[in-house]
Amino acid sequence: MAHRTWGGRFGEGPDALAARFNASLAFDRALWREDLWQNRVHARMLHAVGLLSAEELEAILKGLDRIEEEIEAGTFPWREELEDVHMNLEARLTELVGPPGGKLHTARSRNDQVATDLRLYLRGAIDELLALLLALRRVLVREAEKHLDPLYVLPGYTHLQRAQPVLLAHWFLAYYEMLKRDAGRLEDAKERLNESPLGAAALAGTGFPIDRHFTARELGFKAPMRNSLDAVASRDFALEVLSALNIGMLHLSRMAEELILYSTEEFGFVEVPDAFATGSSIMPQKKNPDILELIRAKAGRVLGALVGLSAVVKGLPLAYNKDLQEDKEPLLDALATYRDSLRLLAALLPGLKWRRERMWRAAEGGYTLATELADYLAEKGLPFREAHHVVGRLVRRLVEEGRALKDLTLEELQAHHPLFAEDALPLLRLETAIHRRRSYGGTAPEAVRERLEEAKKEVGLD
């Protein structure tokens, strides 16, 4: 039992299966950089308050440098029986520097140690995600601008039925807005998690004369957490990050779903780049949008991580419980999933080949300009609800006759209502209708250009 840091209390070692079940090294070794950083700061604090001599501090810092070199070189002797990253680093430090290594854990527990590591890790991970979100938002802005001249128009949908025509640029900017909010959620989560649990020890604080403000400052936290029980027991910061990741992945999934639909023969609006598609093992003609399908599917994986951790913490008594070991694996997986999905979409979107003529024909079909006629009658003074019924009857007749709106003559329009005049006929043309939606946030080219210029400034492309 000598190799186990907690072995003094026990007369025999754990069952082999129990030891494997208990170990977290397979996933928490990802926190080694944060653990080394924390160890260095903690050691300097212990020296500053008189709990380590200058010689002991020097030995510890040199030992930690050696450990960092070993890990980066791939020669560090990781040992599962030591359970986790913290005890692996501490055991190796003691092997390298002797008794000073055993003093490093003074005034600290693994409970506050792991909570601190995880917050440090999430700070860095969020910074990476924010950079990737910015890159993808820039791609969306560039794609929107590229498809404004000439105008690319596609049918907008409600209930997956053709509704009204919209600009493709407007579609790109819709996802831009979603991703902007996603970035804001991550920024908010980072702000709230940026407090230091270090020094809370197991749950009750410590009797040693530590300086928690020093360690918080040196680790880049805005302050130490104010309650030791809360510091070691709470994982709402991880849940908040997972919630932001979940919403972000849902947005990416929705984009992927639309592109999958638009790339089908039935829609035919877009072709996915070969580099982001695969073929069939039996059907030579197939081109499958596998990457988009996996992004869509992996949204469920991230949602599962959020639900899973929520279930873990929902009934935990204060303070620390081993259940909280289950926070890292789903969280790390969700971070990696979202990160890779952002990278893939940023690379995929510029390679899409949009079929302008096919989209234009689809936008003209399905009676998507019927609302223009109803609006026209309302502008002439007819109550909109009555105008709605007039045009609805008109559409029903055209459906029965198998005709399109653009086939209507002025006489046929006036037969349905006398308020129709010559100036109603241009409304049956797509290019006229799309320019009428010029309200703030609308899909008219001038309105979209205004929003595009704002977006360019926001992402530094002006």
Image (tube, rainbow, N blue to C red):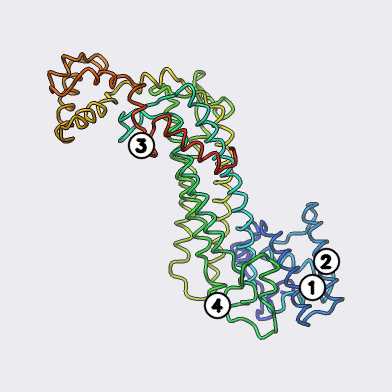
Q: Which residue is mark 2?
A: 63
Q: Residue furthest right?
A: 55
The amino acid type, in three-letter code, at marker 1 is Gly
Helix, strand or loop at label 1? It is helix
Q: CA distance from mark 1 to mark 2?
A: 8 Å
Q: Nearer the viewer, mark 4 or mark 2?
A: 4
Which image quadrant: the N terminus? bottom right
Checking the image for residue 227, the label placed there is: 4
Q: Residue at x 45, y 26 (%)?
A: 263
Q: Nearer the viewer, mark 3 or mark 1?
A: 3
User: On screen, 353 above or below 52?
Assistant: above
Q: CA distance from mark 4 to mark 3?
A: 51 Å
Q: Residue furthest bottom?
A: 207
Residue nearest the observer in this picture, 234 or 352: 352
Q: Residue at x 43, y 23 (%)?
A: 269
The answer to which of marks 4 and 1 sits earlier in the sequence is: 1
> Residue 159 vs residue 134: left or right?
left
